[in-house]
Image (tube, rainbow, N blue to C red):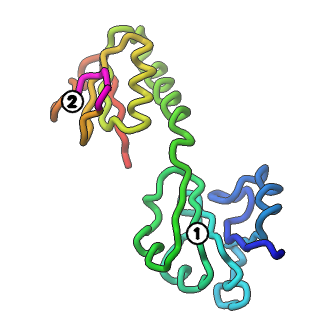
Amino acid sequence: MEKPCILATTFGAPGGIYKRFAPVVEKHFTIIPYETFPPDQKNLSEQVKVVFVWGGALKVDRGLMQSLPNLKVVVNGGVGVDHLDIPMINSFGVKVCNTPHVVDNATADIGIGLMLASMGMDVSGATLGIIGMGRIGYKVARRAQGFDMKILYHNRNRRPRCRPRCVGGSPPEESDPSCCTGCDLS
């Protein structure tokens, strides 16, 4: 049986598939490097079933979608999909998938680490303001509770079973030296 083709940026290139994953990917797919992909080569275009993107290095636009008549799925190697026009991709009958939850713990750990490094003092009893109590914000709050920090948060929706106190429109005072505010910038 012939392996399906995957269109992806070169192994090791920014936004490409990691080199250490090459054996696994090549076991299941024939890889077509995006950098040398000729979209006008009909035979090759018809073989592509998967497009792999990571962080927008490979632009999935209408022209690319039209050149890949047998495309089944656009795979994003990260959590965010802001760089993908999902309604446009879906209009071609193509599915989009990503890797949610995979870096939640690591991101929360880094956030706490940065907070501890930047405050330069004992954080016990300090107030942590979290704007956006999603998956990562919640994990940051759980870690901060281990330091006996007071947690205030603002979110579009109240989190049930969430011990931190939900606050309205006023974030904690930025001038308060015991306050560290984390913000999702996306």
**Residue 90 vs residue 11: left or right?**
left
Disc number for residue 122: none
Q: In this rendering, is residue 25 above or below 49?
A: above
Spatial CA distance of label 1 from label 2 is: 41 Å
Q: Earlier in the sequence, mark 1 or mark 2?
A: 1
Q: Nearer the viewer, residue 92 or 62?
A: 92
Q: Which residue type carries mark 2?
A: Pro
Give the secondary structure at mark 1.
Answer: strand
Observer-side mark, 1 or 2, equals 1
Q: Quadrant of residue 156?
A: top left
**Residue 58 vs residue 36: left or right?**
left
x then y, percent, for residue 166: 23, 28
x then y, percent, for residue 64: 56, 80
Residue bearing mark 2: 171
x then y, percent, for residue 26: 81, 62
What segment carries the magenta color? Answer: 160-166
Disc number for residue 73: 1
**Residue 161 vs residue 4: left or right?**
left
